[in-house]
Image (cartoon, grey):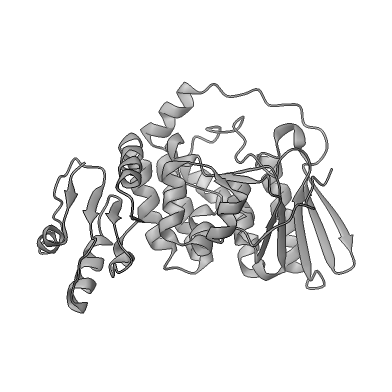
């Protein structure tokens, strides 16, 4: 892992297309104890924002170049670990960081389009194809009841994920059920609050692995997401939503709740974004919702490492708002 100094970086900025090593999957900088002028800061951040690979940096409390960084850490060993993960999944890592740079600048509805296009790019990639070939698709259980239930209580609508046998995985049926429920909230102004919870051992284990790779036309998959993406119905009405989380919240299981104004979690709740190791990026809105809650640097770190986050850590970062041990399964 080659680490470059501020002097190196100022030299790199002389060429808009320059890369120190065209084969390196990340640019790693040591920006500790550095000072730059306002003009240099603007030029560096502009140059860094155009890099087609993740930009990692060792920083101290006085770093003025955070805007141009994708990952900013104070610990050398942590930077090395992130770099190794990027080496293992270079294309997904690059698309992730390019996507979060853009989504952080856009209105959320536009940012969701960018995320979906980026996700589609990786759906057609070799890494995701390899992941599919290495992981046999689980058999799909027979459908039983509707995976989403609604209950009106005055001005409140209780929305419950009720497919505990699948750990409330975001299947097509679950996606469509949530989209219908969230669309109802958007249309009915008498619904002042929407409370979303789940039955079973966890809120949601994320995407339904029995359906992964089932849509081979990535342009069609993008179109479907634009029509039926649950996140698209939340973004303009986030202040009316409260999510009550417990157990595992994997992938979409935290990407959707993170849009809400209020997110509560049981102390046993844990969170993880596993998509990069599948050759993908968070695709249920996580490249939009999670940076908005915890910042782009931490969102990238969570996605690139794939490491779990406890409820206490999530509260400290701002991913959730309250830890409440009274939250239980809705079933």
Image point (63%, 47%), residue name: 253
Q: Is 283 drawn above or below residue 45 in the view shown?
A: above
Q: Nearer the viewer, residue 210 or 225?
A: 210
Q: Quadrant of residue 205?
A: top right
Image point (46%, 46%), residue name: 303
Image point (73%, 26%), residue name: 141
**Quadrant for the N terminus in the image:** top left
- What is the number of callouts on the image? 0
Q: Nearer the viewer, residue 330 or 186?
A: 330
Residue, far bottom:
38
Q: Nearer the viewer, residue 289 or 266?
A: 266
Residue, far right:
154
- Can residue 190 be seen here? The reply is yes
Q: Is 138 drawn above or below residue 314 in the view shown?
A: above
Q: Is residue 115 left or right of residue 225?
A: left
Q: Quadrant of residue 209?
A: top right
Q: Quadrant of residue 257?
A: bottom right
Image point (48%, 51%), residue name: 116
Q: Is residue 118 left or right of residue 112?
A: left
């Amino acid at each position: 892992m080659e680490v470059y100094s501020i002097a190196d970086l100022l030299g790199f900025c002389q060429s808009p297309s320059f890369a120190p090593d065209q084969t390196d999957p990340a640019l790693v900088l040591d920006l500790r104890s550095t000072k730059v002028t306002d003009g240099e800061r603007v030029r560096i951040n502009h140059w860094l924002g155009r890099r087609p690979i993740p930009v990692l940096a060792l920083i101290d409390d006085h770093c003025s170049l955070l805007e141009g960084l994708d990952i900013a850490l104070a610990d050398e060993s942590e930077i090395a670990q992130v770099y190794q993960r990027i080496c293992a999944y270079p294309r997904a890592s690059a698309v992730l960081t390019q996507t979060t740079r853009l989504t952080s600048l856009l209105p959320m509805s536009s940012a969701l389009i960018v995320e979906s296009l980026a996700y589609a790019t990786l759906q057609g990639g070799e890494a995701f194809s390899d992941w599919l070939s290495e992981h046999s698709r689980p058999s799909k259980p027979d459908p039983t009841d509707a995976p989403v239930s609604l209950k009106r209580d005055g001005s409140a609508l209780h929305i419950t994920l009720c497919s505990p046998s699948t750990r409330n995985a975001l299947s097509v049926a679950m996606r469509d059920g949530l989209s219908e429920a969230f669309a109802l909230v958007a249309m009915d102004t008498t619904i002042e609050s929407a409370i979303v919870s789940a039955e079973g051992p966890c809120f949601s284990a994320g995407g339904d692995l029995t359906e992964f790779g089932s849509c081979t036309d990535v342009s069609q998959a993008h179109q479907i997401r634009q029509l039926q993406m649950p996140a698209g119905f939340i973004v303009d009405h986030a202040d009316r939503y409260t999510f009550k989380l417990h157990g595992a919240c994997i992938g979409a299981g935290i990407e959707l709740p993170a849009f809400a104004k209020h997110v509560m979690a049981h102390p046993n709740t844990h969170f993880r974004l596993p998509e990069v190791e599948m050759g993908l990026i968070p695709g249920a809105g996580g490249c939009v919702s999670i940076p908005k809650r915890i910042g782009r640097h931490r969102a990238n770190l969570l996605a690139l490492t794939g490491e779990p986050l406890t409820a206490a850590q999530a509260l400290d970062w701002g991913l959730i708002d309250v830890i409440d041990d009274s939250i239980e399964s809705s079933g």
